[in-house]
Image (cartoon, rainbow, N blue to C red):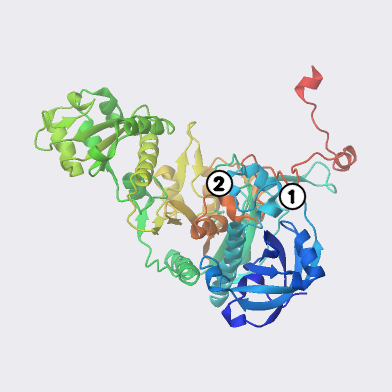
Amino acid sequence: MRSDYCGVLRSADIDRIVTLCGWVDRRRDHGGVIFIDLRDREGIVQVVFDPDAAEHFELADRVRSEYVLKVTGRVRARAAEALNPNMATGEVEVYGTELEILNSAETVPFQLDEHIEVGEDVRLKYRYLDLRRNEMQHNLRFRSRLTTAIRNYLDTHEFLDIETPILTRATPEGARDYLVPSRTHEGKFFALPQSPQLFKQLLMVSGFDRYYQIAKCFRDEDLRADRQPEFTQIDIETSFLGEEEIMSITEGMVRTLFKTLKGVELGTFPRITHYQAMLRYGSDKPDLRIPLEMVEIKDLMTEVEFKVFSGPARDPKGRVAAIRVPGGCDRLTRKQLDDYGKFVGIYGAKGLAYIKVNARADLENGLQSPIVKFLPVETRAAILDRLQAQDGDLIFFGADKARIVSEALGALRCKLGQDLNLYTSEWAPLWVVAFPMFEENEDGSLTALHHPFTAPSCTPEELEQNPLGALSRAYDMVLNGTELGGGSLRIHDQVMQQVVFRTLGISEAEQREKFGFLLDALKYGAPPHGGLAFGLDRLVMLMTGSDSIRDVIAFPKTQSAACVMTDAPGTVDARQLRELNIRLRQKEESIR
Ligand code: ASP
């Protein structure tokens, strides 16, 4: 139908006769001449119809926003006063000679160029219209270019693209499963994969050596701002490579993507252990664009009379830490300090103590703070020394259970970075390594920090003796405070795998029932293997500078895991349920 895309026409096309197809972005009537901004996926070009075009002019007069048109005309230079430097096609216009209305359109429910004022619900209900907007077109095109670049990179490095099942058994990644009832096996269910983890490991047992897949994953969890119930991973697994090699190949991939798609040189990614990350940044995904660090002062507080500090300082599970904000005295208002006090409350902190260092040398009167009177002068001096405080600095304190202090001050650090615009670079990638194998639940039971197939750095005996002290051979890639991806070397030894299951409290019978196929496979010559998975949606979000993950997914779910456009999830009719041998429990109200 068409000879050219609208958005690509330039001065070089002047005098060409072109046929364009697209949507009416805007139509203006300038005293007998009609201007139509015609839009397609490549952009917008101005088309002009004057009365010389006879019946086509009449038609042009009838078109309205979002009508679909086919236009033929000659590309011509715009008059000097009509040049539009803000438009890629702003030096030219198309002098229309023929017009065909391919379809009309009702008035659209929202202006396509003013989405900011439009609620997201409306945008998602009419997603097919929302996707016509420039920003969304750009994001999805970027995403497509990105996945092509990923495939190219992995293909060059001899990875094979292999699909794994969507209808499967539970694949534990720590979330709830989406279940699919089986019609042919009464009372039984498939689970949608939380990740292709076990299948990719089995592919290594099969000898494929390097696998990748751009894979849909499903996790039924309470949604947070950057989560979706179904999302996409760049899933990777390799055999016979150690951590170093796996990190090097995948770091190379991300570096290449940034270079080719954004012209950004990321350089070599620094590495930090999980322990150091928690200690210095209170987070296992630290945002290294922010130069603030947490400093441990637990040892300085054990003997002070101030119980708020000495209590956690004496508690083996407690933590007392501080963050120094250089020049913070002048940069933060009283109101902000109060707000930060409330902010850390979200993370369970009971308050936020601070000291304003007005005059560092004057330990009696130079420190302004509600708490300073509770601290002996020597302790004040020791704190200021440890934090290398200078006049004008503001110091925040956290004292509580270690988890609360790390989370609260870690989040405060990021908030300060944002509020005071402390960023020292645009991109800050890093690897976090040497994670603990397990974390302890309130009831004393253990959970795998990554997943139960992650190899520990110790022997099975050591693991059993001291599971909480064991480290794993896992690694996470972090960018600007967001976890981009994570993975590990895997357990390829059946005995070790059973020790880990046992440590997690999974009985022999349950091991067989749920993971028998894996335990069997490990007996038949499983090679040493490892890999990782990147969150594709998050990567696109970061690279396009989008605020929300939903802005880089064509048809995302809402925060409550629903699709307002198709109205999914929906009810099903009684016959379907009967076929599936499912009877819905009656709601309590109707029973009463
Ligand atoms: N399957 C893991 C995940 O989804 C990634 C990996 O270990 O490769 O987080």
- Measured as percent of width and height from the top left, residue 421 is found at 34, 48
Q: Residue at x 18, y 24 (%)?
A: 373
Q: Residue at x 62, y 44 (%)?
A: 118
Image point (62%, 64%), residue name: 213
In the picture, residue 298 is in which quadrant? top left
> Where, quadrant-wise, is the N terminus in this rendering?
bottom right
Q: Within 10 angstroms of label 2, few (less than 14), some, or many (20 or more) residues?
A: some
Is residue 143 shown above or below 357? Answer: below
Q: Give the secondary structure at mark 1.
A: loop
Q: Is residue 490 visible?
A: no
Confirm whether residue 175 shows in the render. yes
Whole-percent x and y of residue 290? 34, 50
Q: CA distance from mark 2 to mark 1?
A: 60 Å
Rendered location of residue 279, percent (x, y): 32, 45
Type of amino acid at the residue the image marks with label 1:
Thr
In this figure, what is the number of numbered marks? Answer: 2
The C terminus: image quadrant = top right
Q: Is residue 86 left or right of residue 54?
A: left
Density class for disc 1 (Cα within 10 Å; few <14, some 14-19, many ≥20) is few
- Residue at horizontal 35 percent and vertical 39 percent from the top: 409
Q: Nearer the viewer, residue 449 or 216?
A: 216
In the image: residue 4, left or right of residue 183: left
Identity of the amino acid at label 2?
A: Phe
The residue pinned by badge 1 equals 107
Q: Which residue is mark 2?
A: 501
Q: Height in image: 311 above or below 179?
A: above
Residue closest to the eye, 100 or 311? 100
